[in-house]
Amino acid sequence: MSSDPWGRVDETGTVYVRTADGEQVVGSWQAGSPEEALAYFERKYEGLVVEIGLLEKRVKTTDLSAKDAQAAIDHIREQVDAHHVVGDLDALRGRLDRLVETVDKRREERKQQRAKQSDEARHAKEALVTEAEELAQSDQWRAAGERLRALVDTWKGLPRLDRKSDDELWHRFSHARSAFSKRRKAHFASLDAQREEARKTKERLVGEAEALSGSTDWGPTAARYRELMAEWKAAGRAQREHEDDLWNRFRGAQDVFFAARSSVFAERDAEQTENLKLKEELAEEAEKLLPIGDLKGARAAFRSINERWEAIGHVPRDARPKVEGRMHAVERALQEAEESEWRRTNPEARARAEGLTGQLQGAVDKLKGQIEQARAQGNNARADKLERELEGRQALLDQALKGLQEFGG
């Protein structure tokens, strides 16, 4: 017979767990020694400990609902009450009881939060109504109209109140919007004079734009055209029968100027295109240094290439990332070769690599033994789980062995 503080195995292979209510039968074990039986059911107990710990963390750190949390607690409690494990079951029950208290507290907090949200929604809608009633008297037609539309979107995003309160507030809100719309309609009925003023302003802007179309003072003239465009937009719309014709003349004058400027800039672009060709040739020369063999020679060659690179002028902006990226790739390869050389000659790094390899090899060997033992005991589920863990450890070991080869080991 074998025992520990929380359980024992009798001569027939029956496993017991000790609780505050006395011993409970855990199960029967015929596949190995009593010690193995206790170890097996203790591991199952540790599984429950881990499961409770994960649930405690979820309750504490996530928005897990009270309903789902309670269902998870009940599921674990069923496993604890079934006493098919060896360990301090009363301690687990205590943790579950405390977790229930936490969930109940969370449920009450959320109930209060919903009540608070409802109260906040009421205040928010009352504030929207108050603002809408103030905007209904505004003469800032565009800004007030946009703000009223935004208030509608905000209203739609708020929770509904009780039907009576919600309908009363919506009636006031809708009435304010209607009042504003009527006033704005009356205002725009008197805009003909303003549109005539806009036509005169735009006639003046068109005249200046046409006078500037032959300028070769590229920077200041382009800046003035931007200012004229801003003034154009600020002037408002003229009558529909004048607006399109004025715009075509205004835009046409700008097109003449910017076409001439583009022709001049094209010559500069041709020079940058030639610079791009030279840099692409240097990038190709640098790429021939790969893969890095003679590190010292490659470093000197790249330095020479880079000096010639720096002597070349600008390249087209859209082509710059690609050609510079090619040079940076070679530079990174040189840096990596230098780092690899340093690691290869670094005895401390070699010692660390050897130590890690030894630890991983020991872990792999241990897992293989545990898998054989689980198969012998008929515990295929545990063996399959251990084999998946073995795959991960073996991959790490293979990677560590590959790294050790860099040191000539």
Image (cartoon, helix red, strand yellow):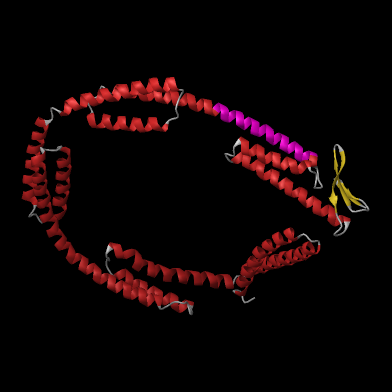
Residue at 49%, 79% (x, y): give it: 293
In magenta, the rendered stretch is 90-112
Where residue 7 appears, as percent x and y from the top left, is: 86, 47
- Give 404 or 149, whichever is nearer the viewer: 149
Quadrant of the rendered image containing residue 351: bottom right
Where residue 235 appears, as percent x and y from the top left, is: 14, 37
The answer to if 102 sits in the magenta stretch is yes
Q: Is 395 positioned to the left or the right of 292 in the image?
A: right
Residue at 58%, 73% (x, y): give it: 344
- Give 248 or 84, whichever is nearer the viewer: 84
Q: Is 289 positioned to the left or the right of 364 in the image?
A: left
- Asked if 269 appears above or below 285 in the picture, the reply is above
Quadrant of the rendered image containing residue 394: bottom right
Provide the major secondary structure of the magenta segment. Answer: helix
Q: Tell me, yes or no, if residue 76 can be seen here.
A: yes
Where residue 309 appears, as percent x and y from the top left, is: 33, 71
